[in-house]
């Protein structure tokens, strides 16, 4: 698919979702907003998976982006939503740029455990820091969009629309990246990193770039989530949150960018309805659903429409 066709398809999908949001009930509007926000974070994990590594500590950059937004609103008085999203992306990107060269020295389970350790260190710092709200975190007021405060039902739709537009732009850029030389090199690193080194390329550089991009995506997802929730807390960096992002990436598979957001929405819907109808055993219902997906779609949801090859 050419970049022009991809742009038209992305624009049509974003336009359709914006129109659909006009008729969605408020609870579903909020659910889709959260699913899209979390999907952006999981998209970063998919980029890493294409290079043969998985981050179990994506909550690190998710929390950095969220706290960057919350502190900018409460301490600096910044309220413009697009500016806050850019600030969160920059803050998380700096963290990724600082940790990426170190983490790229490792692969496999060592890479995953190191990212998890960094995330839990941040969780411990946030939990004990009274200046950052401690274990309870703190609230933030509704942001503004082009100078207009996003209050009421109109504000809910505006946040939804902003999230969908940002998600559409991020998805388009991610799709271009995976089709680029650097993106295709990630597949080569996953297959045989040593051979990539023999050919004159740097496997570590590929992993570092992918990690920085994943960090930026994590910061954007954290910003969108905080803007939708109006609250930030240390659990943003906890390992269970990172595990959810990893599971969405596995559920989606590496074949399609759109599959990441479909998987994120499916997970949010299943969790929401399981919690509604099975309040005491909703984890069991969610676990059974996940097992069914793994059994019948081992290559992820994206294998339903992408990456199909006829047998030899």
Image (cartoon, rainbow, N blue to C red):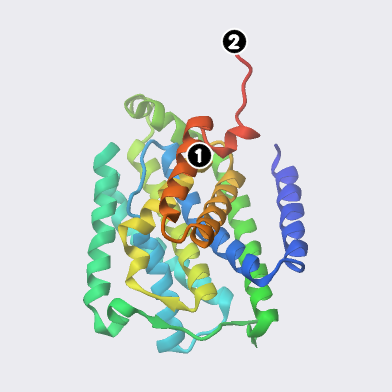
Looking at the image, residue 233 sits to the left or right of residue 128; the answer is right
Rendering quarter of residue 71: bottom left
Find out whether the residues at labels 2 and 1 contact each other: C-beta distance under 8 Å: no
Q: Nearer the viewer, residue 62 or 30?
A: 30
Q: Is residue 120 left or right of residue 203?
A: left
Residue at image coords 60%, 52%: 171
Q: Residue at x 54, y 53 (%)?
A: 270
Residue drawn at (23%, 55%), measured in percent from left and top? 117
Inter-mark Cα distance, 2 to 1: 27 Å
Disc 2 versus disc 1: nearer the observer: 2
Residue 231 x/y as whole percent: 44, 78
Q: Residues within 10 Å of mark 2 (few under 14, many from 20)?
A: few
Provide the residue designation for mark 2: 312
Judging by the rendered image, the residue that carries numbered circle 1 is 183
Q: Is residue 191 above or below residue 175?
A: above
Q: Where in the figure is residue 240, as x and y percent of width and height?
A: 34, 56
Identify the residue at image location x=61%, y=46%.
Answer: 258
Work out whether residue 207 or residue 272 is closer to the camera in this orientation and state it: 272
Disc with the residue nearer the chain's start (2 vs 1): 1
Task: Find residue 94 and report its image quarter.
Answer: bottom left
Quadrant (top left/top right/bottom left/bottom right) for the N terminus: top right
Q: Which one is in front, 169 or 35?
A: 35
Q: How many numbered discs, if any?
A: 2
Numbered circle sitting on residue 74: none
Q: Using the image, determine if residue 68 lies above or below residue 202.
A: below
Kindly state the secondary structure of the residue where label 2 is placed: loop
């Amino acid at each position: 698919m050419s970049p022009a066709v991809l742009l038209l398809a992305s624009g049509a999908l974003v336009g359709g979702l914006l129109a659909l949001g006009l008729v969605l009930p408020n609870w579903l509007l909020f659910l889709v907003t959260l699913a899209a926000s979390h999907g952006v974070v999981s998209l970063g994990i998919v980029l890493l998976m294409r290079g043969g590594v998985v981050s179990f500590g994506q909550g690190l950059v998710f929390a950095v982006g969220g706290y960057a937004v919350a502190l900018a609103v409460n301490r600096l008085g910044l309220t413009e939503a697009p500016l806050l999203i850019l600030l969160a992306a920059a803050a998380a990107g700096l963290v990724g740029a600082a940790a990426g060269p170190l983490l790229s020295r490792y692969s496999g389970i060592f890479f995953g455990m190191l990212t998890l350790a960094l995330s839990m260190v941040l969780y411990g710092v946030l939990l004990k820091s009274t200046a950052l709200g401690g274990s309870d975190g703190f609230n933030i007021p509704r942001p503004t969009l082009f100078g207009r405060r996003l209050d009421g039902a109109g504000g809910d739709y505006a946040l939804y629309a902003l999230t969908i537009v940002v998600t559409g732009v991020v998805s388009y850029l991610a799709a271009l990246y995976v089709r680029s030389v650097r993106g295709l090199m990630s597949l080569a690193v996953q297959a045989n990193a040593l051979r990539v080194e023999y050919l004159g390329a740097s496997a570590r550089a590929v992993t570092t770039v992918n990690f920085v991009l994943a960090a930026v995506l994590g910061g954007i997802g954290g910003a969108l989530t905080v803007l939708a929730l109006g609250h930030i807390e240390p659990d943003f960096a906890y390992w269970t949150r990172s595990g959810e992002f990893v599971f969405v990436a596995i559920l989606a598979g590496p074949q399609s960018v759109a599959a990441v957001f479909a998987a994120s929405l499916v997970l949010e819907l299943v969790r929401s309805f399981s919690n509604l109808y099975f309040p005491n055993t909703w984890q069991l219902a969610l676990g059974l659903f996940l097992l069914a997906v793994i059994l019948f779609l081992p290559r992820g949801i994206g294998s339903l429409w992408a990456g199909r090859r006829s047998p030899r």
